[in-house]
Every structure is written in C-alpha cells, then in structure tokens.
C-alpha cells in the first residue's frame, strides 16, 4: 500500500488542553491537563503547540511537559503514549510576566497510531507560592493521507 496526500485537506486545527490557570504549590500545579480525543486516522503528522502566560519570581521556573497519546476510540480505550515532546522550561532572571508560543512536529506512525490522539500537558511551577500561569495547547494536522494500492 502506498500513500498520496490530498492538498485540499492539508491542515486541520485540533483543540488541545483548554486554557488552565495554575498556582504555584496550589491548583493545577504539577497536574496533568488532558485535551480531548480527535480522530487522526487520515493524517500523516501533527504539530503540537503550547502557549502560556506566566508571572514568575526571579530565578524560579515554569516547566511544561507535553505528550501526545493515542487510543483506539474517542473514549480513550487502550490509551498509550505516542510521542513525548521536548519539555519546555522557562527560567526568569528577573521577576515579571513571560509569554511564549512553543511548537514541535510529530509524525503519526501508522504502526503505532491507534487512530485517535490527544495532547496532555503537565505544568510545574518551582516556586512554593505567588507564581501563576495560564497554559493551553493545540494541534495542527497535515497533510490528509489517502491509501492507494501499489501499482
């Protein structure tokens, strides 16, 4: 079986974890934030993106771990890690507010992709108080994959 790529369906945006407020040593800190499941059977790759707005004290950090999981249906049956993205660590030299958009591409290997994917973010603020952040994620698929019989 070979594949062709249909340019009419080059990219589709998929929601990742919804914007979530994080408080150092409090709500949401070091806690996984799950995105919803999306049918990815027809896509060759996905670009995963993470955005954040953080207010961090001097010398403290915000770390964002991100994985893409795969499952056989939209309820998460047989969920397993498909890809682990580079962990993003933000360190401030001076206190203040920081913003960033971070993205990384993941190829959806047909042999390991069970058909549905979701993003899971785990933010971790190193401070024990005062620091706050709002984090969210998104995915962009592309291109649309069409299976064709070998000639």
Image (cartoon, helix red, strand yellow):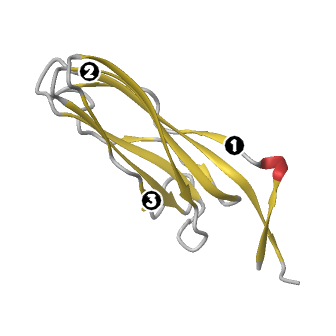
Q: Residues within 10 Å of mark 3 (few under 14, many from 20)?
A: some
Left or right for 62, reference 34: left
Q: Quadrant of residue 23?
A: top left
Q: Please tell me whether residue 36 is drawn above or below residue 116 in the rendered image.
A: above
- Secondary element under disc 2, as helix, strand or loop, is strand
* Residue 83 vs residue 116, the one in the foreground: 83
Left or right for 113, reference 128: right
Mark before the other along the chain sequence, 1 or 2: 1
Q: CA distance from mark 2 to mark 3?
A: 27 Å
Q: Quadrant of the N terminus?
A: bottom right
Q: Please tell me whether residue 32 is drawn above or below residue 76 in the rendered image.
A: above
Judge whether residue 36 can be spotted in this image. Answer: no
Query: Residue 52: image x %, image y %?
Result: 40, 27
Query: Residue 85: image x %, image y %?
Result: 41, 52
Q: Residues within 10 Å of mark 1 (few under 14, many from 20)?
A: few
| Label annotation for residue 12 | 1
Q: Residues within 10 Å of mark 2 (few under 14, many from 20)?
A: many
Dot 1 and dot 3 residues touching (CB under 8 Å):
no
* Residue 45 vs residue 119, the one in the foreground: 45
- Secondary element under disc 3, as helix, strand or loop, is strand
Q: Please tell me whether residue 124 is drawn above or below residue 142 in the rendered image.
A: above
Mark before the other along the chain sequence, 1 or 3: 1
- Secondary element under disc 1, as helix, strand or loop, is strand
Residue at horizontal 57 percent and vertical 74 percent from the top:
111
- Residue that badge 3 annotates: 83
| Label annotation for residue 79 | none
- Residue that badge 2 annotates: 132
């Amino acid at each position: 079986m070979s594949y062709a790529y249909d340019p009419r369906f080059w990219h589709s945006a998929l929601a990742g974890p919804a914007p979530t407020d994080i408080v150092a040593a409090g709500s949401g800190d070091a806690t996984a934030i799950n995105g919803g499941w999306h049918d990815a059977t027809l896509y060759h790759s996905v670009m995963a993106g993470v955005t954040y707005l953080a207010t961090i004290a001097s010398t403290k950090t915000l770390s964002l771990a991100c994985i893409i999981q795969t499952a056989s249906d939209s309820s998460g049956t047989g969920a397993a890690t498909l890809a682990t993205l580079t962990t993003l660590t933000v360190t401030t030299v001076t206190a203040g507010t920081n913003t960033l958009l971070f993205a990384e591409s993941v190829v959806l290997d047909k042999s390991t992709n069970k058909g549905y994917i979701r993003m899971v973010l785990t933010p971790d603020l190193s401070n024990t108080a005062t620091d706050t952040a709002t984090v969210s994620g998104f995915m962009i698929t592309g291109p649309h994959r069409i299976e064709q019989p070998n000639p």
